[in-house]
Image (cartoon, rainbow, N blue to C red):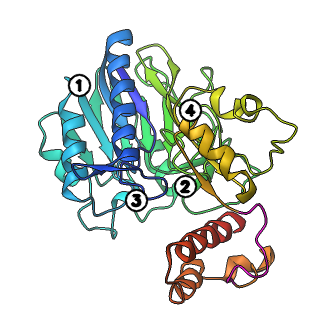
């Protein structure tokens, strides 16, 4: 049996450049569901896939509105495959509470995993490890104690150079040493959660980091996102067409052609292109949107000015001890206009990125 493995989907009415609403779904939500549908349909048609393992964060938040839930159910019912969906950290409101994905389990072709367990898919015994109060290392150790042929985890696989966190584990960790073959099959590991990570990536590897299904905002890296198809022999990647978010604020349009400026965004498969422009390039952005080269754009200054109504950004070395969400809440209390709220969101993104 061939199995398609997909990273974090984050299905939602994303407000940033969300576009017009239709039947309770904005453009970005409709486009994301279309992209997922296209990928699954192609995997079934071209590769004979019979099951899909989704690595968690199916939804972007733990309280999906009815229109989003109904659209998700429609997506899952559309295909004659078995879905195996992990509960990710975005799907849960609290440890031990029912997750946002639990209602999807009422569908006959969907299995939901809110606690670690094992399940047989084809010839392979899979370990299904959703996001729980366990750390990444504890979860990997849990898998190692079971004779599985594959593991799906909503934890992050990172490079050794990245900071240590409870929800991530570095590739090459001692827990991955001497991974055993069971019943003549390799033991493959698939990690979600950490967007853009490519630790352990490649067909010769037993350990794969898929991270996110696609870019979801300007903070996610502009890379080629992939899914993985696993058969009885080995895994191989398939490219994911999806939205691309690219920052063009550093481009000098007086010396750079529009085509060249968009090359980075258009060089990978993309279904929609969203861009950041600096204020003086707004007319160029409007023209690009008008002729259909980009889907939409945001205007944001390249560097924050002193009179933009925000506190001076905190030094990087102090951010670890700061409650970022509380900082943003305090800023929002003084904001009244749409422009103020946009600046508040940029302030939030800046703090998150620098922390």
Residue marked by disc 4: 291
Q: Residue at x 40, y 20 (%)?
A: 183
Residue marked by disc 1: 81
Distance (Cα) linking label 2 and label 4? 50 Å
Whole-percent x, y for residue 277 in the image:
69, 52
Name the image quarter holding residue 15: bottom left
Whole-percent x, y for residue 11 in the image:
36, 48
Distance (Cα) linking label 2 and label 1? 32 Å
Instruction: Determine the secondary structure under disc 2.
Output: helix
Residue marked by disc 2: 137
First-in-chain label (1 vs 4): 1
What residue span does the magenta drawing correspond to?
Answer: 301-310
Q: Residue at x 42, y 40 (%)?
A: 152
Whole-percent x, y for residue 334 in the image:
54, 89
First-in-chain label (4 vs 3): 3
Q: CB under 8 Å between callouts 2 and 1?
A: no
Q: Nearer the viewer, residue 12 or 228?
A: 12
Residue marked by disc 3: 90
Q: Nearer the viewer, residue 249 or 124?
A: 249
């Amino acid at each position: 049996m061939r199995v398609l493995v997909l990273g974090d989907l984050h299905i939602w009415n994303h407000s940033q450049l969300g576009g017009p609403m239709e039947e309770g779904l904005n453009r970005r939500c409709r486009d994301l569901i279309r992209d997922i549908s296209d990928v699954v349909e192609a995997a079934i048609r071209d590769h004979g896939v019979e099951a899909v393992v989704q690595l968690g964060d199916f939804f972007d938040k733990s309280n999906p509105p009815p229109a989003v839930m109904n659209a998700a159910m429609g997506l899952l019912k559309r295909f004659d495959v078995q879905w195996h969906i992990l509960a990710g950290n975005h799907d849960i409101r609290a440890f031990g509470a029912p997750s946002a994905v639990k209602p999807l389990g009422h569908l006959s072709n969907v299995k939901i995993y809110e606690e670690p367990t094992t399940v047989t898919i084809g010839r392979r015994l899979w370990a299904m490890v959703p996001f729980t109060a366990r750390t990444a290392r504890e979860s990997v150790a849990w898998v190692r104690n079971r004779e599985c042929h594959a593991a799906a985890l909503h934890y992050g696989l990172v490079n050794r150079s990245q900071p240590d966190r409870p929800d991530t584990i570095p590739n090459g960790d001692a827990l991955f040493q001497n991974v055993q073959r069971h019943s003549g099959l390799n033991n493959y590991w698939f990690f979600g959660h950490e967007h853009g990570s490519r630790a352990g990536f490649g067909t010769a590897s037993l350990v794969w980091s898929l991270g996110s299904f696609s870019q979801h905002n300007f903070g996610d890296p502009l890379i080629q996102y992939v899914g993985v198809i696993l058969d009885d022999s080995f895994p191989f990647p398939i490219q994911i067409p999806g939205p691309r978010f690219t920052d063009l604020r550093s481009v000098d349009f007086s010396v750079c052609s529009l085509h060249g400026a968009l090359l980075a965004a258009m060089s990978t498969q993309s279904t929609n292109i969203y861009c950041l422009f600096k204020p003086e390039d707004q007319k160029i952005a409007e023209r690009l949107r008008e002729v259909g080269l980009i889907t939409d754009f945001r205007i944001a200054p390249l560097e924050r000015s002193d009179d933009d109504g925000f506190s001076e950004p905190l030094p990087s070395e102090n951010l670890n001890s700061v409650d970022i969400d509380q900082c943003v809440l305090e800023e929002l209390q003084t904001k009244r206009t749409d422009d103020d709220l946009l600046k508040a969101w940029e302030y939030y993104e800046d703090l998150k990125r620098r922390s």
